[in-house]
């Protein structure tokens, strides 16, 4: 897991993403995991799904989550409502559990 950045840097980066792509919505993680590769064997509690307005937005947020937070993307898929992206939160959950 990458080193978390300081809060001010995080918020500056987040505001830039929101200004360019809009704020993603959280969405049903279990349903998103089923959509992306049939669930890929990950518990929905170990992931988080977001809905984006474009593939470009989903890819930009995925890259930022990996680079700055250490959360890899489990995949991106188009839906009738936009683009779904799912991130793997297991490294963070493991870190919190081991505190």
Image (spheres, rainbow, N blue to C red):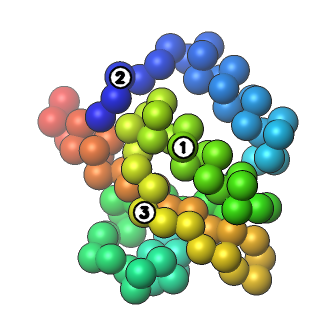
Q: How many marks?
A: 3
Indicate which disc, 1 or 2, sits on the residue closer to the N terminus: 2
Q: CA distance from mark 1 to mark 3?
A: 12 Å
Rendered location of residue 74, percent (x, y): 42, 63
Place of residue 33 in the rendered image (x, y in percent of width and height, measured from the top left): 45, 75
SS at badge 1: helix
Q: Percent from the top left, x then y, of residue 83?
A: 69, 68
For the residues labelled 2 and 3, the Cα–Cα distance comes to 20 Å
What residue is rendered at 47% in x and 19% in y?
A: 5
Residue with the mark numbered 1: 63
Disc 1 + disc 2, Cβ < 8 Å:
no
Label 2 environment density (alpha carbons within 10 Å; few <14, some 14–19, many ≥20): few
Give the left or right position of residue 24, taking residue 27 as reference: right
Q: Residues within 10 Å of mark 1 (few under 14, many from 20)?
A: some
The residue carrying mark 2 is 3
Q: Is residue 11 above or below residue 48?
A: above
Instruction: State which tag comes first along the sequence, 2 or 3.
Output: 2
The residue sitting at 56% across, 38% down in the picture is: 64
CB under 8 Å between callouts 2 and 3?
A: no
> Looking at the rendering, which quadrant does residue 92 occupy?
top left
Report the residue at 35% width, 22% height from top: 3
Determine contact: label 1, label 3, CB under 8 Å. no
Q: Who is closer to the viewer here, 72 or 14?
A: 72
Q: Which residue is mark 3?
A: 74
Q: Work out whether 35 lies above or below 17.
A: below
Q: CA distance from mark 1 to mark 2?
A: 15 Å
Task: Choose mark 1 or mark 2, whichever is in front.
Answer: 1
Secondary structure under the numbered disc 3 in the rendered image: strand
Which quadrant would residue 37 be assigned to in this image? bottom left
Q: Is residue 50 visible?
A: yes
Task: Specify whether residue 28 is in view.
Answer: no
């Amino acid at each position: 897991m990458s080193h978390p950045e300081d809060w001010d840097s995080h918020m500056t980066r987040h505001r830039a993403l929101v200004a360019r792509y809009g704020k993603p919505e959280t969405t049903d993680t279990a349903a998103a995991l089923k959509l992306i590769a049939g669930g890929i064997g990950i518990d929905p509690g170990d992931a988080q799904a977001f809905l984006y307005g474009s593939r470009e937005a989903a890819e930009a947020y995925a890259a930022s989550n990996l680079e700055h937070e250490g959360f890899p993307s489990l995949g991106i898929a188009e839906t009738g409502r936009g683009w779904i992206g799912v991130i793997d939160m297991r490294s963070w959950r493991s870190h919190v559990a081991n505190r």
